[in-house]
Image: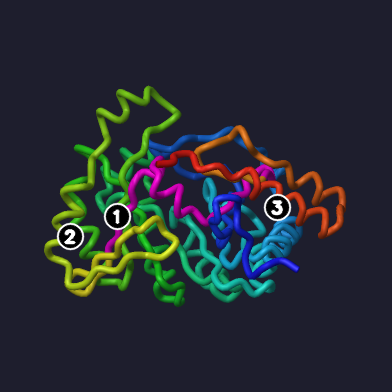
């Protein structure tokens, strides 16, 4: 009999499973890594995802996050959420760019989705087009407001801060979030593998230390999030804001409680590594037993090595 949750060999509990449903997307963001594409016909089906989540539940996973690419491009996304929700996880969330959220928010809520994180870096149309190469800002904003309306709670906005692009728009975004009961997460840009790292970082990286110090000075209250790398929540003037640091650091690794599934059905033990993936989906498609699938999950967990250690 397994314990309530499974520990890796560094005594880190496996609490969350993040599943990349697709790496297809309907925008082309400046900082996106654009990992190798998986054809839609090769993506995991709702039944296969149900099986994977069922095994994850057996080994103690409490939370599921669905992501992409853009997960709402998956044609059976509502059915997928409904099947996963039938397993009664503590929390099912999704990360989306919000463009199709107005269409799907109510159905997703009814299917069992608890909450959404929406990637939105600006409320300015020209800036949005510069970052995404698309003109979907109003669709994204409408999707966010629809998510709030149907009760996906909390709605969070992920805002990647880029030097000389949107660092002066934080106040406007925070006001939008406060007005609509949305949590704002400011994300410090990480280096992109899709272009010259040094030049890209020099052009766009914006250190958030000064901003976080300002928040600490004016916050009405500050809470530290458990199992979230010591990330702090700042409560300011009735709003809530967090700062998300680049993950290639020892604090992130020491507190990591998440396992990942790639869009082609492999277990990814570490966010920052691709040399220790564990094949899973072929075993699901071959109809192997739940016991065998559980052993494969455990093998993935045993492959977890902190990318950075002190």
**Can you see residue 287?**
yes
Q: Is residue 1 above or below residue 19?
A: below
Membership of 248 in magenta stretch: yes
Q: Residue at x 71, y 66 (%)?
A: 2
* Magenta region: 241-266
Quadrant of the image for the C terminus?
A: top left
Q: Is residue 94 above or below residue 43?
A: below
The image quadrant of residue 123 is bottom left
Q: Is residue 228 above or below residue 195?
A: below
Residue 298: mark in rendering:
3
Q: Which residue is mark 2?
A: 215
Q: Is residue 2 above or below residue 110?
A: above
Residue 243: mark in rendering:
1
- Alpha carbon separation for disc pair 2 and 1: 10 Å
Q: Residue at x 44, y 28 (%)?
A: 194
Q: How is the image coloured?
A: rainbow
Foreground mark, 2 or 3, reads 3
Mark 3 vs 1, N-terminal side:
1
Q: Secondary structure at mark 1?
A: strand
- Alpha carbon separation for disc pair 3 and 1: 32 Å
State the residue in front, 9 or 228: 9
* Residue 150 image offset from top left, x and y in percent: 46, 76
């Amino acid at each position: 009999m397994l314990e309530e949750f499974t520990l890796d060999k560094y005594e880190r509990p496996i609490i969350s499973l993040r599943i990349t449903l697709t790496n297809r997307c309907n925008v082309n963001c400046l900082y996106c890594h654009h990992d190798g594409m998986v054809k839609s016909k090769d993506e995991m089906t709702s039944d296969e995802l149900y099986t994977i989540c069922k095994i994850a539940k057996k080994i103690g996973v409490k939370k599921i996050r669905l992501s992409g690419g853009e997960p709402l491009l998956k044609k059976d996304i509502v059915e997928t959420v409904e099947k996963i929700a039938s397993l009664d996880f503590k929390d099912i969330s999704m990360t989306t760019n919000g463009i199709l959220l107005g269409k799907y928010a109510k159905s997703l809520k009814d299917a069992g989705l608890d909450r959404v994180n929406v990637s939105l870096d600006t409320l300015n149309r020209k800036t949005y087009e510069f970052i995404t190469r698309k003109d979907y800002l109003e669709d994204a904003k409408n999707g966010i407001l629809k998510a709030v309306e149907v009760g996906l709670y909390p709605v969070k906005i992920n805002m990647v801060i880029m030097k000389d692009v949107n660092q002066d728009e934080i106040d406007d975004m925070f006001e939008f979030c406060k007005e609509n009961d949305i949590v704002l997460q400011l994300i410090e840009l990480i280096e992109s593998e899709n272009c010259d790292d040094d030049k890209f970082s020099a052009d766009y990286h914006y250190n958030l230390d000064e901003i976080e110090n300002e928040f600490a000075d004016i916050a009405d209250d500050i809470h530290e999030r458990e199992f979230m790398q010591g990330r702090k929540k700042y409560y300011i003037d009735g709003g809530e804001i967090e700062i998300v640091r680049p993950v290639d650091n020892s604090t992130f690794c020491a507190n990591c409680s998440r396992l990942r599934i790639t869009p082609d059905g492999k277990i990814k033990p570490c966010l920052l590594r691709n040399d220790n993936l564990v094949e899973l989906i072929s075993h699901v498609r071959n109809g192997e037993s739940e016991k065998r699938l559980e052993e494969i999950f455990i093998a993935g967990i045993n492959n977890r090595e902190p990318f950075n250690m002190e």
